[in-house]
Amino acid sequence: MKSISYAKVDCSGNELKYVAEVLSSGWLTTAGKTFEFEKKIAEATGAKFACAVNSCTAALHLAVDALGIGPGDKVLVPAMTFTASAEVLRYVGADPVFLDVEYNTALLSPKILEAGIRANPEVKAVIIVHFGGQAADMDGIIAVCRKYGIKIIEDAAHAFPTRYNGKMIGGFGDLTCFSFYANKTITTGEGGMITGNDEALMKRIKIMRLHGINRDIWNRFTSNAPSWEYDVVAPGFKYNLPDIASAIGLAQLERAEEFRQSRQRCAQYYYDRLSGLPEIDLPSIKCPMEDHSWHIFPIILNDKSRIDRNRFIELMAEAGIGTSVHYKPLYRMTYYRDRYGLTPDNFVNTERIWKGCVSLPIYGLLGQDELTYISEKIKEIISK
Ligand SMILES: *Cc1c(COP(=O)(O)O)cnc(C)c1O
């Protein structure tokens, strides 16, 4: 029987070579490799500044802090996302206000956003999730946010490399947060990056990334002043990315577009083989195939399907095919449900997605025969 995992990491490029360079340098924490990684991500995204951190969750926390979001503040968050997008608000005593998403894309639309702001006029900011690797409608979203004076944090954990109108995600909102977690489009094992164009915000982020020390890591590393001499200006965090991780990231970055293309090949194959099946809704793409990072390929078993999502996943597993679910909506998680008294009724589209969503394997190491096998099994299972 075949065994096809949901995700698989490809570290067959320069990863070992660059990690070996770090190990033999004798300096394992944040230094040259991390500064190089920051520089290259800034170049790749076109953002003025980039700050490497040890997770996207840390990046989101630092972004929320830098934008001055604090106790009692409200921030809009799509319900269809990972808990990290919302939990960081609780870190600073702020509260998420959850919004529904579009059924076909699982994205926040400018229309949903504007309705959310009108219903909650006191909101300070919105967290935009580029779900699956397709960019949200940033022109529309920016126009709405300008109109009401609210800040934009992009949770771009799925979105490297993603383009919007041909331009890389990384500098549309006030701050953009990327993830290099093990199963993301490029990885450092654990890691993240914040990009943006505002120097004052980035200065705060760099100070808070390392204990609230007033000289950032680069300054302590390169300046003639002794590195032991520093002041603490805030109770900061320990969120820096070590050079071992950045070494892996540099090697992954060299192949980011190659990885993206190979995931696009998988997506194209699924569209070719699975479109037209009445039981399955395929992800709807409003951008050119090339602008999509193709991090996730979520299909939805709709109400014409005779078997439910959980049974489908079981049968796929029996056929040796790993799948995943993105996501169980946050209003269904005990913490958010109980704290905010949420019910599914206010999230019609998210609920429809949740009932039927299954994410298929999508990565470069998937061979043509495996893609064929997956597609044939899906057809077999839904026609049972
Ligand atoms: C993976 C993910 C995160 C968290 O990333 P980490 O690097 O693991 O902290 C945040 N938001 C979304 C949408 C994610 O998929």
Image (tube, helix red, strand yellow):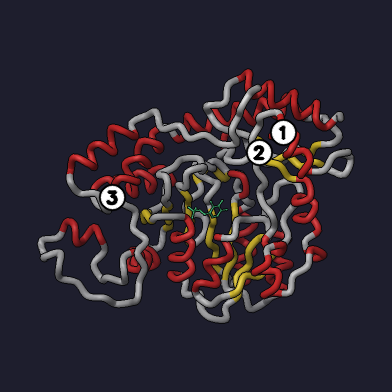
Above or below residue 153? Residue 179 is above
Q: Is residue 43 visible?
A: yes
Task: Name the N-terminal-most of marks 1 and 3.
Answer: 3
Q: Is residue 99 visible?
A: no
**Badge 3 amino acid:** Phe
Task: Where is residue 312? Give x, y as percent.
Answer: 77, 38
Q: Is mark 3 within 8 Å of ligand 1?
A: no
The answer to which of 220 and 198 lies nearer the viewer is 220
Contact, CB < 8 Å: mark 2 with mark 1? Answer: yes
Instruction: Give the residue number, with chain letter if any, for mark 1.
Output: 316
Give me the C-alpha separation between circle 2 and circle 1.
8 Å
**Badge 2 amino acid:** Thr
Q: Secondary structure at mark 3?
A: helix
Q: Quadrant of residue 319?
A: top right
Instruction: Give the residue number, with chain letter if any, for mark 2.
Output: 323
Q: Residue at x 33, y 66 (%)?
A: 203
Q: Secondary structure at mark 1?
A: helix
**Badge 1 amino acid:** Met
Task: Name the N-terminal-most of marks 2 and 1.
Answer: 1
